[in-house]
Amino acid sequence: MKDEQLRILKTMQEATNRMDFNTFSQAVNLEPNQTIAEMQILAQEGFLQRNGNAFQLAEKGKKALKITQPYPDKSFQFYVGIEKPLGIYAQSLEEFYRQIKQVCSDSLDFHLYRGDFEIWIKDVLGDNELAEEVGNLKELKLTGEELRRDLIKTLDSSYGVGDLL
């Protein structure tokens, strides 16, 4: 998703009441024609939906915003063992997804089987359902690249994170 599109979604979420289109375009720092074009793309992709002559956030748009919501004081820190930090952090679900794709598989094994992923997802992101789905991966006894693949698939099925990046 482009930065301009994300600004549109965030501005729509934060708006407390209707605003005229020129004010909205200024708020997202785009020219009116560019704003219209980006909003049409967002609507075609299901992030926005029409409500009469206006647009509003669709569920997919709300999820996209949740994915990018940063939690800087509650970052997930990746380790490969007790007292063995990698110096890699994730402050949002988007960053978590990106790091899952790149971090060494030993770190994935370490965190999954300790329950660290599900605790962070539940306590920080507030998503009990996703936390449970990630926790259920332990029962499959996956490790390494198979675990990475299933973690990515689980995040994609819940949020479509890969579609947004």
Image (spheres, rainbow, N blue to C red):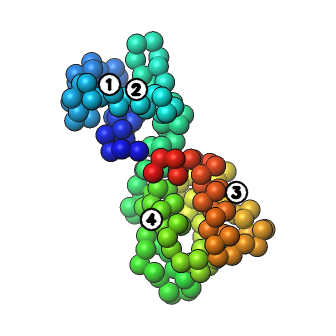
Q: Measuring from the top left, give residue 100's x and y in whole percent.
A: 53, 67
Q: Quadrant of residue 138?
A: bottom right
At label 4, the amino acid type is Ala
Instruction: Look at discs 4 and 1 and give the one toward the viewer.
Output: 1
Label 1 vs label 3: CA separation? 38 Å
Q: Residues within 10 Å of mark 4 (few under 14, many from 20)?
A: many
Does 57 sit left or right of 39 as displayed?
Answer: right
Picture residue at 59% right of the left edge, 81% below the top: 106
Image check: 117 left or right of 93? right
Q: To which quarter of the image does residue 31 belong?
A: top left
- Front label number (1 vs 3): 1
Reading the chain from its start, which is encountered first: label 3 or label 4? 4
Residues at marks 2 and 3, CA–CA distance in whole angstroms: 34 Å
Given the image, on which type of amino acid does mark 3 rest? Glu
Label 3 sits on residue:
133
Which label sits on residue 90? 4
Report which residue position mark 1 lands on: 36
Q: Measured along the vertical axis of the image, is residue 39 above or below residue 107?
A: above
- Secondary structure, mark 4, is strand
Task: Determine contact: label 1, label 3, CB under 8 Å.
Answer: no
Q: Is residue 19 left or right of residue 48?
A: left
